[in-house]
Amino acid sequence: MERTHDSNGEGYGPRPPPYSPQDYAGGPYTGMSYQVGKGNVAVVSPPTTYDNMVHPEEVAAAGGNEQYGQAPPDYSHGSDDHCFSDAAVRRGFIRKVYLTLMIQLLVTVGIICAFLYWDTLRRWTLDNYWFSYTMMVVVLVLILVLSCCDNVRRRVPLNFITLGLFTVAEGLMLGSVSAYYEAEAVLWAVGATALVSFALTLFAMQSKWDFTAKSGSLWVFAWTLFSFALLCAVLRSQYAYITYACLGTLLFSLYLVFDTQLILGGKHRKYEISPEEYVFAALNLYLDIVTLFVLLLQLIGLCR
């Protein structure tokens, strides 16, 4: 095979054209052909889409849209966004819980006032003592439903409907109990409950003491108080009743701090309630506050 040199004597016949990225960066490669030597040998490159993987910066300079000409995304630390998201979710959860709790308490106070100042309703309640026991059973059933059935307390609007029925039933029960006391004693109990609840909520928000880790101790205290309540029922002593009311007030004050810290969460808390459980959280706070009201009402009534 004869060698055919070009004018410079540096190779075989005419060489292929030099590569220029500007020729191919703007669109797909259309292909080309060229002759090799004196024979009938030709090199043909088929048309195809050409990606410049060797010099992507030249493609970007030529105005191409390939992915290699794009700058990499800026690196950012993900934990900051994650912490901000958690804090925002927790704040929204707290607002939702306390808004629900405020509506519950307003409805309850309104029902209690109806039993105190509507004489016909008050006399009917005193003549039909079965009404109070019926409302106690209804309240207990609704508490069990909201506490044990996840699909009820998490499904909107079923959770709000059930919580509304529970609030009305609890208000009727408290109103029927308040009918047996003087209006002045009930108002004193309402004021004392509001003051104690507000002070304990502020304490729970500001304190670094973790009451969420003391759930076992509170549970033991509650069962001890229940045993003491059975003893009071047997003894029927006014001083035993007063002692029971004082211990019960202390217990549910601690439970109010405990439940408040479960809702607030934070780095100083061992446990916290999930943001999805806003109905359950509002239920816990509401039960703590109304139980405080009943115990303070009993204590004021015994001391008068």
Image (cartoon, grey):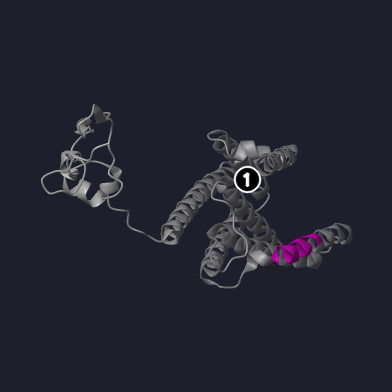
| Residue furthest left in the image | 7
Q: Is residue 216 magenta?
A: yes
Q: Quadrant of residue 295?
A: bottom right
Q: Quadrant of residue 270?
A: bottom right
Residue 295 in view: yes
User: Image quadrant for the C terminus?
Assistant: bottom right
Camera-nearest residue between 287 and 128: 287
Count of number-bearing discs: 1
User: Residue 214, image x and y in percent?
Assistant: 69, 67
User: Residue 108, image x and y in percent?
Assistant: 56, 46
What residue is at 54 percent from the left and 70 percent from the top? Answer: 203
User: Image quadrant for the N terminus?
Assistant: top left
Q: Which residue is mark 1?
A: 175
Q: Which amino acid does the dot numbered 1 rest on?
A: Gly
User: Residue 168, image x and y in percent?
Assistant: 59, 39
User: Residue 180, image x and y in percent?
Assistant: 68, 49
Residue 182 in view: no
Task: Give the side of residue 129 with respect to residue 91, left or right.
Answer: right
Task: Give the side of residue 262 with respect to residue 61, left or right.
Answer: right
| Residue furthest top in the image | 40
Camera-nearest residue between 44 and 167: 44
Camera-nearest residue between 143 and 301: 143
Q: Is residue 57 above or below residue 30?
A: below
Magenta-highlighted residues = 214-223
Q: Is residue 25 magenta?
A: no
